[in-house]
Image: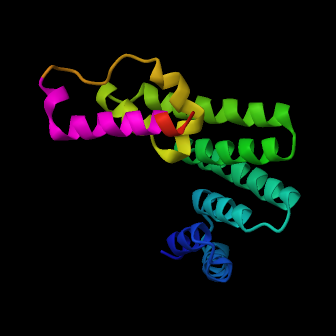
Amino acid sequence: VELLHARRAARLGDVDGARGALDRCKAHLDAHPADDLQATVSLVSATLAPTAQAKLRELERARDLAERSGQRALAGTVQAELARACSDLGLHTLAEDARHAARSAWERIVADLEPEDRAAFVRHPDRWGVLGEREERAAPVATSATSASTPLAKLLSVNRRLVAATST
């Protein structure tokens, strides 16, 4: 729960609230270590880092922990953030390597999803910038003529067009 508070506070710009929640998380993790949670703590900590170099170090730590945890989705999210941080520092080769690692992790997950679930996975904000452009060229998600007329299908269609319009 504290980790969720930390992530939310960091997104809202509440640095003190995020740091306090992260400190409570770290205290708990010292007693009960878990690679996935430690990776997420490092991911949130990176958003609060005072310098771009400190952010990069924290994201590299998060990457190592996420990979050790075996959670592909988390590893992909961390790699995507690492790609952005490397790009911000002008480390273009490292940024592309991290983008490729994120794409690989997420594509492996997509391979196991049903076709109708793939679009939703790809369109998640954490993944869209890495996977979205490739998946736009994929076949339509609807599996029958009736599914295209459901309210949810219409909403998803509108959402796809909005995302495509704002990502260019």
* Residue placed most toward the observer, 71 or 19: 19
The spot of residue 149 in percent (x, y) is 15, 30
Task: Give the color scheme: rainbow, by chain, secondary structure or one colour.
Answer: rainbow
The spot of residue 13 in percent (x, y) is 63, 72
Q: Is residue 150 magenta?
A: yes
Outermost residue, left side: 146
* Residue placed most toward the observer, 27 or 163: 163
Visible in this render: residue 48? yes
Q: Residue at x 64, y 75 (%)?
A: 22
The spot of residue 56 in percent (x, y) is 81, 53
48 lies above or below 142: below
- Range of residues picked out in magenta: 146-164
Q: Is residue 41 magenta?
A: no
Q: Is residue 131 left or right of residue 120?
A: right
State whether the magenta stretch is mostly helix, strand or loop: helix
Quadrant position of the C terminus in the picture = top right
Q: Residue at x 63, y 36 (%)?
A: 102
Q: Residue at x 61, y 44 (%)?
A: 75
Q: Is residue 136 left or right of residue 66?
A: left
62 lies above or below 122: below
